[in-house]
Amino acid sequence: MYLVDSNVWLELLLEQERAEEVRQFLQAVRTDEFALTEFTLYSIGIITSRLNKKDVFAAFLSDVLEETGIKRISLSLTDLMELLSAMQEQDLDFDDAYQYVAAKNNDLILVSFDRDFDKTDIIRKTPAMVLAERADCN
């Protein structure tokens, strides 16, 4: 199962450089294999609001969360304490540590464009890496 990071969703929602890569990834993988954190959800809401793209956030809520039932992950108090340790031990900022703990504690592969995760002990893949692996399996 894949934990999809904020930057992956935003790449598509804001039609950035790697939007097509993300689109192909989302089409190739079943939605029941996806998860996102509450932190990702709120980050997307904050960023789209600041960019005056509330309609993009509304569509994201409807199309991605409401209709697909993608798993949402919240961290417990214990997880948040672990997050503080991860910030120091893995040299991550708060938002990366949140994703790190969510992926690690739920045995998820993190799909992200953020290379900061490469120095940690979890698996980080880009959407293109997942697509390539799936192509190799077929």
Image (cartoon, rainbow, N blue to C red):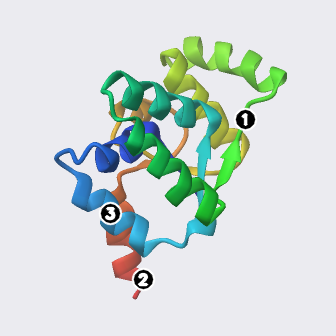
Query: What residue is rendered at 32% in x and 28% in y?
Result: 52
Q: Amino acid at mark 3?
A: Arg
Res 1 visible: no
Q: Element type at marker 3? A: helix
The 10 Å Cα crowd at callout 3, few under 14, some 14 to 19, many 20 or more, is some
Query: What residue is rendered at 16% in x and 47% in y?
Result: 17
Q: Element type at marker 2? A: helix
Residue 57, image x, y percentages: 45, 41
Q: Which mark is residue 137?
A: 2
Please state which of the two labelled residues, at mark 1 or mark 2, is closer to the viewer: 1
Marked residue nearer the N-terminal end (1 or 2): 1
Query: What residue is rendered at 81% in x and 28% in y?
Result: 76
Left/right placement of residue 76 relative to residue 9 reads right
Q: Quick one: quadrant of the C terminus?
A: bottom left
Residue ranking furthest to the left = 17
Q: Nearer the viewer, residue 100 or 13?
A: 13
Q: CA distance from mark 3 to mark 2?
A: 20 Å
Image: 65 above or below 68: above
The 10 Å Cα crowd at callout 2, few under 14, some 14 to 19, many 20 or more, is few
Q: Which residue is mark 1?
A: 74
Query: What residue is rendered at 54% in x and 16% in y?
Result: 94
Q: Quick one: quadrant of the N terminus?
A: bottom right
Q: Nearer the viewer, residue 29 or 120?
A: 29
